[in-house]
Amino acid sequence: MLDITKKAILLGIGLASMAGDKVEELGRKIAEEEKLSKEEGRKLVEDLLKQSDEVAENLKDQVEKLVENTLEKLNSPSSKDLQKLEKRIKKLEELQKVE
């Protein structure tokens, strides 16, 4: 039963991107309902928080890749490309001042 509940929570965390304090609160509630020992409850909360962080990081990486791929398909310059151009422009402006 606990395993199914844990999986359902993790799915919810992935979908809703719950805040850490909410994950912790939910973990404590489940620990109480499942009548877990303090140590088991603490372990459950730690596991849920760790997995929540991993899900958030994974989601962030996926979004960054999606945005990067979309910009590439649109043939839009990246911020790195723009920074390179700005450096080149500054160099050219400095060269013009010297002449």
Image (spheres, rainbow, N blue to C red):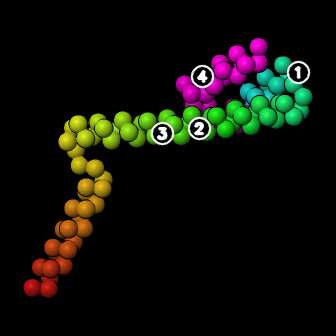
Dot 3 crowding, Cα within 10 Å, few <14, some 14–19, many 20+:
few
Mark 2 and mark 4 lie on one chain; the one further toward the N terminus is 4
The total number of labels drawn is 4
Task: Measure the alpha-carbon separation of dots 4 and 1.
Answer: 22 Å
Sequence-first tag of 1 and 3: 1
- Residue kind at label 4, given as amino acid type: Leu
Residue 13: image location, x then y, percent? 61, 27
Q: CA distance from mark 4 to mark 3?
A: 16 Å
In the displayed image of the protein, which residue is found farthest to the left?
Answer: 99
Q: Which residues are magenta?
A: 1-24
Magenta stretch containing residue 7, yes or no?
yes
52 lies left or right of 79: right
Question: Residue tagged by mark 1?
Answer: 35
Q: Are marks 2 and 4 in contact (CB under 8 Å)?
A: no
Is 38 positioned to the left or the right of 72 in the image?
right
For the residue labelled by badge 4, is the local secondary structure a helix, a strand or a loop?
Answer: helix
Residue type at numbered disc 3: Lys
Residue where numbered disc 2 is placed:
54
Query: Between marks 1 and 2, how big is the CA–CA gap?
Result: 27 Å
